Amino acid sequence: ISLVRGSEGLYMVNGPPHFTESTVLPRESGKNCKVYTFSKDGTLFAWGNGEKINIISVTNKGLLHSFDLPKTVCLEFSPKNTVLATWQPYTTSKDGTAGVPNLQLYDVKTGTCLKAFIQKKMQNWCPSWSEDETICARNVNNEVHFFENNNFNTTANKLHLQKINDFVLSPGPQPYKVAVYVPGSKGAPSFVRLYKYPNFDGPHAALANKSFFKADKVTMLWNKKATAVLVIASTDVDKTGASYYGEQTLHYIATNGESAVVQLPKSGPIYDVIWNSNSTEFCAVYGFMPAKATIFNLKCDPVFDFGTGPRNAAYYSPHGHILVLAGFGNLRGQMEVWDVKNYKLISKPVASDSTYFAWCPDGEHILTATCAPRLRVNNGYKIWHYTGSILHKYDVPSNVELWQVSWQPFLDGIFPAKTITYQAVPSDVPSEEPKTATAYRPPALRNKPTTNSKLHEEEPPQNMKPQPGNDKPLSKTALKNQRKHEAKKAAKQEARSDKSLDLSPTPTSQSSAQNTVSQPISGDPDIDKKIKNLKKKLKAIEQLKEQAATGKQLEKNQLEKIQKEKALLQELEDLELGI
């Protein structure tokens, strides 16, 4: 089921393949529905209609409870559907006396209010539960208060550091862990620490600690197995003036105490970072446009680089076997759907003007939408198959706004992972060809042939995994030293070839002739393959040099190829010596 909320009201739509309006929820007409939420397993649904908060059972379609809370703007169920948390804006009376508690926790079974707290800020308003609801935590005056077994009358534990700005509980079963962020002050760095509940006391209580400068705010992302946290630290202002969006850095912290700064090969903003559900790799989208996207492993080494492209978001499918890279917001909505096991591109659909993207829990379907107030024109939603086919499309009438759409959630394991298909799934909805706007050409150039000049050098995707027989990827310093060593080697080689110029007028052709005669077989198919490819490239360079000698004008990329000859020869020599 998918849920639709807008100026036409609130209603449910049956998911693929039917797309008819669902009878689970009678349509709530009018513009007063401000908020709705599903329980984590999708069996309960709660919404506010401007007068009451109602809870229904999705499975047997019955109304469970109704609460008089007309001003509620936030709703959340606890993981096991025991508690419904509601939040309304905090107000103080005109005479300055303290306001009434505005965060209520209701028992879903009985409908009684378990506890009410004062929670002034909307940000991080909702208490955080562990998956089995054994512990629940909330930030109170810069310290984290823990409650056990939904008993909110006694604080079971407190985590007190100088000023905790934010915290995130780990997902999954016991042992529970918590990541806390303390912003830096008076020249001291900010830091993120990981703790195991309830071991908070003593100087060595923290499982891991990472301190860093340049952080006005952070985002902390646990992986599903709760073994590591990614921290995106960002400043509001980039002092170098390189970016409007401030400056971002990406840090990795593991519960075994390891920590690192994730080295991103391209400078610029970090748009998105996401963990794969397998917890062993993550994808980052970063760098000035056209942005790069790279998958890293737990050593923070790049595993696969998707090259550059118009993208600012990444979404793994629930099973982690498909990755969508997309360019939304101020980009045109191009999507790249990748099979991440084989690193093959499946499809390249375009969802222009999208303000929302979500994978269906079945790992097969995708929902994209254009919602108000982000965009007030062309509101509507589409349901796609990941192979690029649009299976259902709904555009709201021009005088109507769409505010929110979402899938009904399901617990992991309900939908088994299916094998990936590359063939577009048949659909009755005609596929939309994106309008390609032709580039503006000044009148003086209109009847002349177009020159193929590009604004940016595009980088193709490449596998970064160390090939069998090679050692593990080198560190930055090792790479630097290796380059220096290679440069020295090349300089020596050059000096030698200069001396022998009188004796042999064409050393390159000689060496290439020698190479073709001796065909070394190393016994390692990978090395043989590399040698073969190098010889192919050298042969192509020979041909280009011959063309240049006949007076033919070479292209820029062809000249660059010729410049690479020395390095290729050196590489070939090294490989053959290795044999």
Image (cartoon, rainbow, N blue to C red):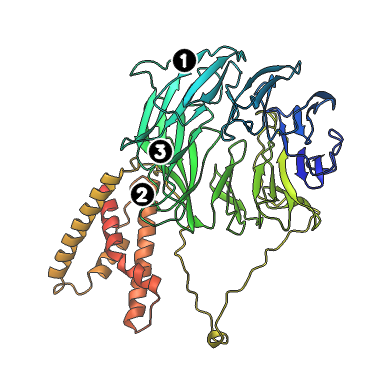
Give the x, y percent position of residue 57. Answer: 80, 26
Disc assigned to residue 527: 2
Of 189 and 532, the residue lying toward us: 189
Residue at horizontal 85 percent and vertical 25 percent from the top: 62
- Please say whether residue 139 is visible from this viewpoint: yes
Q: Give the total of numbered labels.
A: 3
The disc, 3 or 1, on the residue closer to the chain's N-terminal end is: 1
How many other residues sit within 10 Å of disc 3, few (<14), some (14-19) or many (≥20)? many
Q: Is residue 329 left or right of residue 554?
A: right
- Say if mark 3 contacts mark 1, CB within 8 Å: no
Give the x, y percent position of residue 498. Answer: 15, 69
| SS class, disc 3 | strand
Disc assigned to residue 223: none
Tell which residue pokes out farthest to the front in this image. Answer: 95
Of 291 and 428, the residue lying toward us: 291
Relative to 136, residue 168 above or below: below
| SS class, disc 1 | loop
Give the x, y percent position of residue 445. Answer: 53, 85
Residue annotated with mark 1: 198
Estimate the spatial distance between the alpha carbons at disc 3 and disc 2, rounded to whole Å.
36 Å
Residue annotated with mark 3: 251
| SS class, disc 2 | helix
Q: Is residue 42 left or right of residue 188?
A: right
Q: Residue type at mark 3?
A: His
Q: Residue type at mark 1?
A: Pro
Estimate the spatial distance between the alpha carbons at disc 1 and disc 2, rounded to whole Å.
54 Å
Of 134 and 421, the residue lying toward us: 134
- Please say whether residue 577 is visible from this viewpoint: no
Q: Is residue 187 left or right of residue 228?
A: left
Of 22 and 397, the residue lying toward us: 397
